[in-house]
């Protein structure tokens, strides 16, 4: 059994600053760390750290960042056979300045220049043993191909909808779990109410729809009912990747066959733990850390 | 014959942005490049690219940035035997956002955490064959030891004075060439006039004193006279490292035995060429490029 992921991966440098530097100035940083990022890649790192086998498909350039991205995923035990290297291309990179108080983030990023994954590059071996497909929709054609191929094979699909992008409507219709960021619902014209969330979610087509709302937790719509799961209050250092870690925890619960509510609570706990660290992948917790976090709060954890 | 350098080296990431991002935003970059930097290291890269043998002493951490710094210097043919790696330490790093129009730079940097070079670490082999010592004064104790040791051995010394720092007064007294940034003279209370520059320069102790003034060129004081050399007008992309490349060109002219004025003109030409590229070391020109630049402008170049 393996969780297959498809989407974006990047190399992030994060620097903690006292406050965001004014233009033309020179600011000394606090902590300075480098690590992998990207929605789909970070979700898969979380799943791997929770103890499940993973396989990731995406593209990098043949630059230093590409080698670092590949190495970091490989070091988590993730199968990177389908992470393709585009000769002459630049990998996606980001520099993220995190303010020490308030955690406000300012990002400078470099767009990857390599060709997207083509449907023809997702061959048979990518699907072998797949128990779940997770994708972030950032490579439209490959994503649509992936979700159709997964359906044909009876593999459940989760889509991370960061915002409304070309192809997202179609992906939302075809997937089993749409787990969206607040921006995606704002792009749909959401007014923030539970009532309108229910209507919008029901209109998307996916049988289960979740929206994450940062420290306000999440709303999940399934089978005609909506459930709100609050965020766990933690001393947040940096929320980079919280949503992606949430997806990883969510996938884990589903694969363990847990009820939806317990699954979302587990996902929130994993995401809350990720907020204690700078960066996306560095903060993804191990299974024992999430269990301890929940047990410490008197929350029962279903059998793993 | 070898030029020995002593001081700072770092690893720079530069990203071109349309304009400096407002806090809490996400900005896509244009060009994104990584390369070595640091005043003394960049001056030596320039000297090496101009064709002379170099040896560099400094410290890095045992992190990825340290390996990249070492590799970049080594790739220029610089002897890095005296570039020491401090276990467990972080190397100096910087992220430099350069605005496309105007070239305004905003810098976030990480202080290196390794112990400075100690005088005892500058042993006999460092001095072997040295024809010139260049230092940026950023490691006070090693710098003072270096300049005294060089004097004792009859090796001429150039000091890059970026600003007034502890030990700078002493270094200025002991060196042969003090080549300072404008900030150093502003720190001395300079009002910007040639008259006061002459007085301040004469009071420092070094027989030759130059101050670089960005696109306003430089002033050089020697033997009771002051000479102004204008900057070469160029389509500037980024001035990171211009001063360091200026030092490299200056050292080259001195080692070739050129008159002071021709030396400074050559240094300005090298520095102007460096402004055409993003970053410090990437823009350091080769000898044939500087000669062509000067010849194209009808400026005679002394025999090399
Ligand atoms: N400051 C926070 N404190 C605790 N949990 C948080 C915090 N921010 C996010 N989370 C958790 O992570 C989940 C996803 O975060 P969110 O910010 O909505 O996603 P994204 O990172 O994609 O923008 C939230 O639903 C919540 O459970
Ligand atoms: N915009 C520019 N155009 C042409 N030459 C320049 C420009 N900026 C710097 N230079 C050259 O580089 C030299 C050093 O630049 P300066 O900015 O004074 O040093 P630093 O980089 O140490 O601040 C100047 O004296 C000049 O010759
Ligand atoms: Mg997200
Ligand atoms: Mg300088």
Image (cartoon, coloured by chain):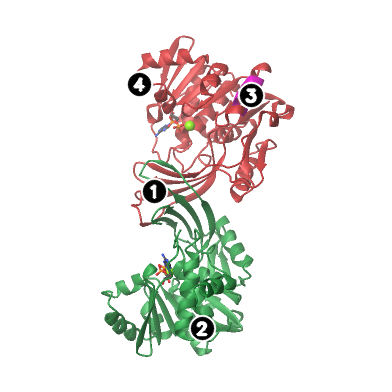
Chain colours: A red, B green
Q: Residue furthest top?
A: A224
Residue ID for mark 3: A145
Query: What residue sits right under mark 1 in the picture?
Result: B19
Q: Which residues are magenta?
A: A142-149
What mark, if any, has residue A192 been given in the picture? 4
* Viewer-proximal residue among B231 and A49: B231
The quadrant holding residue B48 is: bottom right
x, y (%) of residue B170? 38, 82
| Tag nearer the camera, 4 or 3 | 3
Secondary element at image label 4: loop
Looking at the rendered structure, the secondary structure element under dot 1 is: loop
Q: Quadrant of the C terminus of chain A?
A: top right
How far apart marks 4 and 1 lie (CA) works out to: 33 Å
Question: Would you place residue B230 above or below residue A278 in this image?
Answer: below
Residue B112 x %, y %: 47, 61
Q: Chain of mark 3?
A: A
CA distance separating discs 4 and 2: 70 Å
For the residues labelled 4 and 3, say whether their Cβ atoms are less than 8 Å apart: no
Q: Is mark 4 within 8 Å of ligand 1?
A: no
| Parent chain of label 2 | B
Is A52 positioned to the left or the right of B200 in the image? right
């Amino acid at each position: 059994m393996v969780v297959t992921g498809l989407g974006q991966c990047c190399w992030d440098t994060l620097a903690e600053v006292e406050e965001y530097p004014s233009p033309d100035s020179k600011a000394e940083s606090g902590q300075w760390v480098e690590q992998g990022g990207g929605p789909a890649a970070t979700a898969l790192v979380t799943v791997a750290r929770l103890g499940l086998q993973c396989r990731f498909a995406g593209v990098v350039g043949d630059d230093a960042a590409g080698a670092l991205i590949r190495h970091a995923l490989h070091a988590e035990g993730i199968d990177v056979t389908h992470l393709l290297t585009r000769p002459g291309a630049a990998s996606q990179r980001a520099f993220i300045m995190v303010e020490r108080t308030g955690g406000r983030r300012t990002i400078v990023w470099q767009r990857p220049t390599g060709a997207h994954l083509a449907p023809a590059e997702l061959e048979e071996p990518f699907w072998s043993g797949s128990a779940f497909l997770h994708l972030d929709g950032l490579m439209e054609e490959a994503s649509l191909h992936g979700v159709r191929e997964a359906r044909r094979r009876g593999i459940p699909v989760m889509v991370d909808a960061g915002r409304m992008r070309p192809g997202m409507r179609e992906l939302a219709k075809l997937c089993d779990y749409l787990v969206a960021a607040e921006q995606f619902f704002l792009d749909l014209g959401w007014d923030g109410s539970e009532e309108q969330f229910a209507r919008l979610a029901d209109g998307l087509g996916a049988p289960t729809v979740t929206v994450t709302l940062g420290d306000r937790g999440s709303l999940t719509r399934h089978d005609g009912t909506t459930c709100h799961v609050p965020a766990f209050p933690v001393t947040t250092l940096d929320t980079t990747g919280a949503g992606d870690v949430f997806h990883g925890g969510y996938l884990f619960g589903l694969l363990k066959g847990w009820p939806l509510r317990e699954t979302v609570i587990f996902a929130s706990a994993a995401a809350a733990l990720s907020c204690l660290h700078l960066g996306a992948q560095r903060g993804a917790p191990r299974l024992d850390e999430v269990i301890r976090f929940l047990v410490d709060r008197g929350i029962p954890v279903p059998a793993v």
